[in-house]
Every structure is written in C-alpha cells, then in structure tokens.
Image: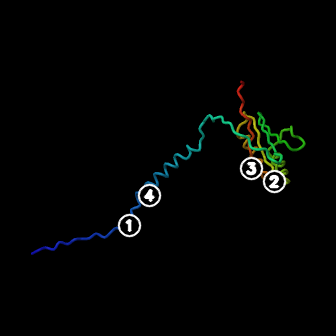
Amino acid sequence: MLKRVRRHRRRPMSDINVVPYIDVMLVLLVIFMVTAPLITQGVKVNLPQAKASGIPSPTVESVIITVDQFGDYYIDIGEDKHQPATERIIAERVRTVLEYKPETPILVRADKEVPYEKVLWAMVAAQYAGATNVGLITAPPLRAAP
C-alpha cells in the first residue's frame, strides 16, 4: 500500500513584523535626544575676512542706529542725535519714521568691541517698531600700505 504523502501548504503571511522598525526608531530617537543639546552650543571659530561690494545707496535716506564701544545707543534722527538713547527711544523714533515713510531702510552700525547682544537688542528695537528688514553697516577692509 502506498501511503499518501500529505503536503501541507503554508498560507502566505500577510502581517509585517514591525517590532524591529520600532526598535530602530527608538534608538534613533535616543541618539537625537542626546546630540541635540550638543549641537545648539557654539564652537569658537575665526571667521575669514572677505571683500564684499557695497549695496547701492538707497534713494530714500536711511535711519542709522549706532552702538559705540561702551554699548551706548545713538540714533541719527531727532533733536538729540549725539545723546545716548534707550531701546524704547529707538523704537519710538523708528516707528515714527516708518509711519511716514515705510520704505525707509534701518541700519545698525556697531563698534567691533561691542558684545553681540547689544547689536541684537538694537535690531530687536527696530523690528519691534515695525521694521521688516534691518541691515548692518560694516567698515571696508583696511588696505595694505604700498
């Protein structure tokens, strides 16, 4: 007698095992959580010097906010141009100018010894007053003596 061999056919599995994918995602999440605080901290670098061409002079007179080497603010509009001004005074004067001439460029000029935070606060005061673009004025590079 011949035995019949039963062949069991396995049904195709229609499920995907996602456990390995979840493991990989959790490992990646942990890696990003650990490295994210390290990325936000700055690294001390010496920036390269470069020659840049100036922008064409605007057709409208611009407002210049100056930050001197002591961190005092000055704004070139108003009666007391040579008197130190606060961020509030800068914002009020810039707002007044922008109400009459919204296209007026707002520029910040700062001494190279001034902490970056002081320059930032000058820019924030101008933006608080409604300036959408605030530019920076830099000195041209020194020319070598012949």
- Alpha carbon separation for disc pair 2 and 4: 54 Å
Q: Amino acid at mark 2?
A: Pro
Q: Mark 3 Cα within 10 Å, few/some/many (few <14, many 20+)? A: few
Residue mark closest to the camera, 2 vs 1: 2
Residue at 31 percent across and 70 percent down: it is 11
Of mark 4 and mark 3, the one earlier in the sequence is 4
Judged left or right of residue 138, residue 98 is: right
- Alpha carbon separation for disc pair 3 and 2: 11 Å
Q: How is the image coloured?
A: rainbow
- Alpha carbon separation for disc pair 2 and 1: 63 Å
Residue at 63 percent across and 35 percent down: it is 48
Q: Secondary structure at mark 2?
A: loop
Of mark 3 and mark 1, the one earlier in the sequence is 1
Of mark 2 and mark 1, the one earlier in the sequence is 1
Q: In x, y percent, where is residue 37? A: 56, 45
Residue most extreme to the bottom: 1
Q: Amino acid at mark 4?
A: Ile
Report if the CB atoms under discs 4 and 1 are less than 8 Å apart.
Answer: no
Q: Amino acid at mark 1?
A: Asp
Residue 27 or residue 105, whichever sits in front: 105
- Per the image, the residue denoted by label 4 is 22
Task: Say the numbered circle drawn on residue 133.
Answer: 3
Position of 30 relative to 143 (above/below): below
Task: Say the numbered circle drawn on residue 15.
Answer: 1
